Amino acid sequence: MRKVQFTETVLRDANQSLMATRLPYADYADILPAMDKAGYYSIECWGGATFDSCLRYLNEDPWERLRNLRKNLPNNKLQMLLRGQNLLGYKHYHDDVVEKFIELSIKNGIDIIRIFDALNDFRNCETALNATMKYATKNTIASGCICYTQSPVHTVEKYVEMCKELKRMGFQTICLKDMAGTMTPYEAEHLIKGIKDAVGDMPLILHTHSTTGMAYMTLTKAIESGIDVIDTATSCFSGGTSQPSTETMFYACQQYGIETGLDEKILNEVNDYFKPIKQKYIDNGQINPKSLGTDAQALVYKVPGGMLSNMIANLTDMKAMDKFDAALAEIPQVRADMGYPPLVTPLSQMVGNQAVTNVLVGERYRQISKEIQNYIKGEYGIAPAPISEELQKKVLGEGGKPVDCRIEDQKRTGQEFEDAKKALGDLARSEEDIMSYICYPDQTMKFLEARKAQEENEAVYTIEAM
């Protein structure tokens, strides 16, 4: 009997897409023992925007969250999403920082590291891959990830060659990351069959979103075409900008006679648990109705779920939601000018923010963000297609040339670690605290200062009570 396995995303990408990663650990801690018995291939629970959100919004230590997940999900593979040389941030880090982050992630409980580069420039995945294999346990899997998008330069043949390259590099599985939900059933069939012919029985995974309404058809065609693992979300946190429903795809596979290894009773228990949690965030406005619907226009804009929810949140904060449609319409032009980068973090935020700026300012590229400038300078890697000459001139000047990002990234100075130790002083109690500061200095400093103050207050209270 053919088998298709499931990765459950509710603890990471589902809530990242629907509510900008604002789901605290305390909300789902009680359901973890049940989830541990559901029969998932893996549970995606860390990486992506969770690290930033823990520190910035939820007053949580992301490393402590991971350790708790490991403790309460002993029988499951814990999965994270890693942005290659960007780790979980929005800039490139030196190789020694990337290696230490991987070491600590595995030490604290991660099994599967899904590694991608926003430009599909796999030079930016090599250090993370090598570190994953260096610190691997018997449960570690290095999963190479391709950011799927459509453009004049993105073809089936190009994607097949990318998969061959990931296999040659030593990745153990390959994931097609359709972050905007724009992959059609037709594309899925031709892509997956082409890749399977090229890489043999190497496990192939499909990650998509329901944003455009294509996802269920695309997953079904992917299963027919030989996909091995699909990413889904428990049904109350599915749909809209999130993933397709776990239960729905489970029932579909059952009728096809495809084995999944899932326990139907536990799947329903998990969904029943999350229903009131979802309703709570709808009621308080953290889940915006726009994130729950289907928007076929995303087939034009190529906007992923997390990017869409962040744009909505940012425009709402600026009291500029009336500019939402204009900002969406601006995205394809900005993307074309930048050489058709896939819209995935951090590039999705960079392109989205620039589109919003262009609309709010009323003139294209009068203000160019620092991140976009760095991208044009070559600090993120090689663009899939040539960048607009006009845009390059604005940043590089007449005749200016971009740099090779790997020349800088390969430096192992140790400076980031020394700077972090000096800045934190006795606030840092572990290598994990140091690493958090390197990734998010301002947020980590505030978090660690608050942690220390809280503990001192508790100590005073205890002494007085005695």
Image (cartoon, rainbow, N blue to C red):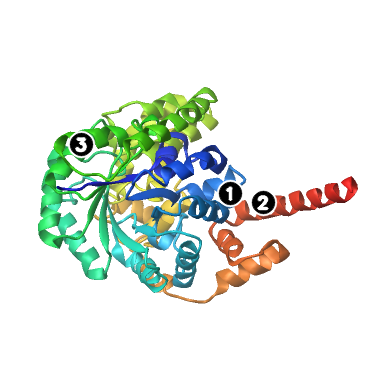
Mark 1–mark 2 distance (CA, rounded to whole Å): 8 Å
Three-letter amino acid code at the position of disc 2 = Lys
CB contact under 8 Å: marks 1 and 2: yes
Q: CA distance from mark 1 to mark 3?
A: 41 Å
Q: Which residue is denoted by mark 1 in the rendering?
A: 55
* Amino acid on which the number 3 mark rests in the picture: Gln
Residue at image location 13% in from the left, 42% down from the top: 224
Mark 1 crowd level (few <14, some 14–19, many ≥20, 10 Å Cα) = many
Which is nearer the eye, 208 or 157? 208
Please say whether residue 87 is visible from this viewpoint: yes
Q: Residues within 10 Å of mark 2 (few under 14, many from 20)?
A: few
Q: Position of residue 11 (x, y in %)?
A: 44, 43
Classify residue 125 by image quadrant. Answer: bottom left
Say whether residue 397 is left or right of residue 204: right
Q: Earlier in the sequence, mark 2 or mark 3?
A: 3
Residue nearest the observer in this picture, 415 or 325: 415
Label ID, residue 254: 3
- The image shows residue 63 at horizontal and vertical percentages of 55, 56
Task: Check disc 2 and report the residue beneath it.
Answer: 446
